[in-house]
């Protein structure tokens, strides 16, 4: 069976692929729904580190720095897919493994870019967290990040894959 996929953002490509996989491996008509409920998407990109020439572009208490660990990205306008529950899950796993993390909250009056996280989260319904290693001068010809932040990000991703199912089984969220 061949499925045609559109390559534009927001297309049903991921949902179609998940549907195909679950139908291939299971005759349970509810398997896709169950898989989505048990899933968690880590939208891993990079994050803007506090730039010394543009300190006013960052929220006062949310200024990611190099060597500070992975950044969990939040945006009130949903330019990032992180919410309270997904942030909590990611932070719990980081804390359990003594891995540092930082929160980044975009200023409300500043436009910002986005990631694929909100597109996939809204199109599929999988819980999503947007994260990234802090990077100075993101999108410039002189961008740089700290090697230890890359290592810490890797360690946190590894811990997440080891711990998520166990932690998720303990969480009850009222809707």
Image: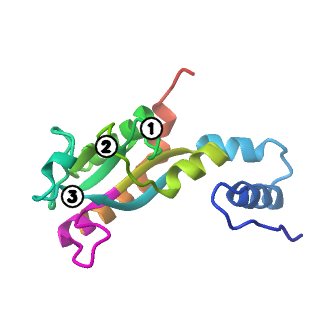
Residue 39 seen anywhere in this rendered image of the structure: no
Task: Give the number of the disc on residue 106.
Answer: 2
Q: Residues within 10 Å of mark 1 (few under 14, many from 20)?
A: few
Side (left or right) of 147 relative to 7: left
Q: Position of residue 137 (x, y in %)?
A: 23, 67
- Residue 5 falls in image quadrant: bottom right
Q: Residues within 10 Å of mark 2 (few under 14, many from 20)?
A: many
In terms of secondary structure, where does tag 2 sit?
loop
Q: Position of residue 100 (x, y in %)?
A: 20, 51
Residue 140 seen anywhere in this rendered image of the structure: yes
Q: Position of residue 174 (x, y in %)?
A: 54, 20
Towards the viewer: 115 or 53: 53
In terms of secondary structure, where does tag 3 sit?
loop
**Magenta residue span:** 132-150
In terms of secondary structure, where does tag 1 sit?
loop
Task: Give the number of the disc on residue 137.
Answer: none
The residue beneath circle 1 is: 77
Is residue 14 within the magenta segment? Answer: no
- Residue 159 falls in image quadrant: bottom left
Q: Marks 2 and 3, Cα distance to the nearest angstrom?
A: 12 Å
Q: Marks 2 and 1, Cα distance to the nearest angstrom?
A: 9 Å
Towards the viewer: 32 or 164: 32
When the figure is inspected, residue 124 is found, relative to residue 48, above or below; the finding is above
* Quadrant in the picture for the N terminus: bottom right
Q: Residues within 10 Å of mark 3 (few under 14, many from 20)?
A: many
Among numbered discs 2 and 3, the one appearing first in the sequence: 3
Q: Are marks 2 and 1 in contact (CB under 8 Å)?
A: yes
The residue beneath circle 3 is: 49
């Amino acid at each position: 069976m061949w499925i045609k996929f559109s390559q534009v953002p927001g297309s049903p490509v991921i949902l179609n692929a998940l549907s195909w996989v679950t139908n291939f491996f299971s005759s349970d008509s509810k398997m896709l729904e169950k898989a989505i409920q048990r899933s968690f998407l880590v939208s891993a990109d990079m994050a803007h580190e506090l730039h010394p020439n543009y300190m006013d572009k960052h929220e006062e208490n949310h200024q990611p720095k190099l060597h500070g660990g992975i950044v969990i990205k939040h945006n009130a306008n949903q330019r990032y897919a992180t919410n309270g529950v997904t942030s909590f899950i990611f932070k719990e796993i980081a804390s359990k493994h003594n891995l540092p993390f930082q929160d980044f909250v975009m200023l409300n009056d500043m436009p910002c870019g986005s990631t694929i996280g909100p597109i996939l989260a809204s199109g599929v319904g999988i819980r999503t967290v947007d994260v990234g290693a802090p990077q100075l001068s993101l999108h410039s010809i002189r961008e740089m990040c700290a090697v230890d932040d890359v290592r810490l990000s890797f360690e946190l991703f590894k811990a997440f894959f080891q711990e998520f199912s166990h932690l998720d089984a303990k969480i009850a969220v009222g809707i």
